[in-house]
Image: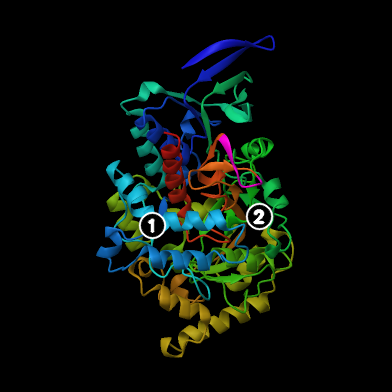
Amino acid sequence: MSSEGWHRGWIMQTYQSDVVVIGGGLAGIVAAIELLSAGKRVTLLDRDVEENFGGLAKESFGGIFLVGTPEQRRSGVRDTPELALQDWLAFGAFGQDEAAELWPRRWAEAYVNDSHGDIYCWLRERGVRFLPLPLWVERGQFSGGNSVPRWHVTWGTGHGLATQLIRVLQAHPRRQALTLKFNHRVDALTSQNGSITGCRGVTEDSGEEFVAEAGAVLVASGGINGNIERVRAHWHPEWTRPPETILNGSHKFADGRLHDAVESAGGNLTFLDRMWNYAAGVHHWRPRKPGHGLSLVPPRSALWLNWRGERIGPQPLVSGFDTRELVTQICRQEKQYSWQLLNRKIALKELAVSGAEFNPSIRDKNIVGFLKDALLGNHWLLEQMTDNCKDVVVADSLPELVEKMNALQGDGAVDLSTVRSVVARYDAEIERGPTFHNDEQLRRIAHLRKWRGDRMRTCKFQKILDQGAMPLIAIREFIISRKSLGGIQTDLDCRVLDKEGMPIPGLYSAGEAAGFGGGGMNGLRGLEGTFLGGCIYGARRAARAMR
């Protein structure tokens, strides 16, 4: 319910309920559904316009980390919570600071044990379906990583996931107990007698002040990675210095404003330097925010080169094994951007853009379109990229391609003789045949192709200079900001903890704002899919705690 009251001489809009949920992303939507089901009156405040209800999840590809599903079993995958936890802790580099990792570790243990019931079954009961074949991502560069495929893609991408749950929320039997407000920016939390009792802010469109009063507040406002200055300020030392260009692949309102509000209220922020950024960002040709970037799924058969045209190594960069390592290797270069060199045949089979926007057949649940793209190649995507993306150059010969690469960057940094030598050595290795492959990239491609989900989208040892695969393509790629792995520290009830580890009465956090649980449940790197999964799982735990 809402009312108007006098405050400091101004008429202020006031909302009153049992719980205020700040943030209309996936975590906020799930929490609102569960709180309504528990008999609570809920005020859900979102800073964005109603059209964007669903947040960053609505833009995502929709992959969720799940353990022990029917989809895994039907694909011959034998998985257990014990194996998943072993992979999780190893890949996240747990064990470096046991005291600081206490809550992240507990969240990791809880997630792997509960993901089937609390995420998979809960979503299935609400009409969400998955592609039949789980994908095998983050296998680990040298050790750790996912031992088996666990990345379950929602049929409909993240757009379908978010819109389906919004439908569930809007059709809830207790919908009248929900006050749903858009264009509402929360600036601060309010308190009384040591307990959080609500929040205050202004409307984005009119600048009018409002206050929301409740017995509890759930902060589900996303991370900090939409604020590139904050990304730079918290850049991890392992990544040396922040690159000159960092594209924005996060939500434009994931700016850390609520992190500041929680910290002002006594909450503890942890591991803000742990981020899930990507190595293959390109400029969006229809930007909706400053520095808007698209995250490519880097083609495995492309040669990944540094700013001079040298192959990055000694371990060649290949996606699908360790996303963080890709970022680390590029950030160690003198200039922190890179090139991928490929040809049309590779691009048609392997080029992809992460997210719902450039996966329309899955987003729109178009089976015919999905099969056509998988079997015949993404002709429409390649055409869009080559026609519109300023980071893509195309040529019929290597000298022409290098000339265009240098013209694009505005210098002569890429050396033709270097590139020619790199390509010749790689193609010669392929020419000798699989029995004699001694190139690590080719070994990894062979490993990738053993799993059906990767074999469909990975070329079988494709040479670069192949007259039947022309023209040549070079893609200039930048680091792109995406998700915060750290955030507001919480216990397993999603209660926000102060710097002494004590819960702050009335204050809760879930989703990316809380580092997907505990202030950073993934550790240093994530196994992918724990982000959407963490939003759902954390929101449900928070709602149970507030009943």
| Residue that label 2 marks | 273
Q: Residue at x 51, y 75 (%)?
A: 143
Q: How many marks?
A: 2
Relative to 144, does residue 194 appear above or below in the rendering?
Answer: above
Decide which of 50, 127 is in the foreground and name it. Answer: 127
| Residue that label 1 marks | 113
Relative to 514, does residue 136 appear above or below in the rendering?
Answer: below
Relative to 531, does residue 147 appear above or below in the rendering?
Answer: below
Residue range of the region highlighted in magenta in the rendering: 499-505
Look at the image and say whether residue 407 sits in the magenta stretch. Answer: no
Residue 73's spot in the image, x, y percent? 27, 64
Mark 1 secondary-structure assignment:
helix
Relative to 338, does residue 425 appear above or below in the rendering?
Answer: below
Decide which of 23, 219 is in the foreground and name it. Answer: 219
Task: Examine the rendering and report whether any part of residue 136 can be seen.
Answer: no
- In the rendered structure, the answer to whether residue 518 lies left or right of residue 246 reads left
Name the amino acid type tagged 1: Asn
Name the amino acid type tagged 2: Asp
Q: Residue at x 63, y 54 (%)?
A: 271
Q: Residue at x 62, y 68 (%)?
A: 400
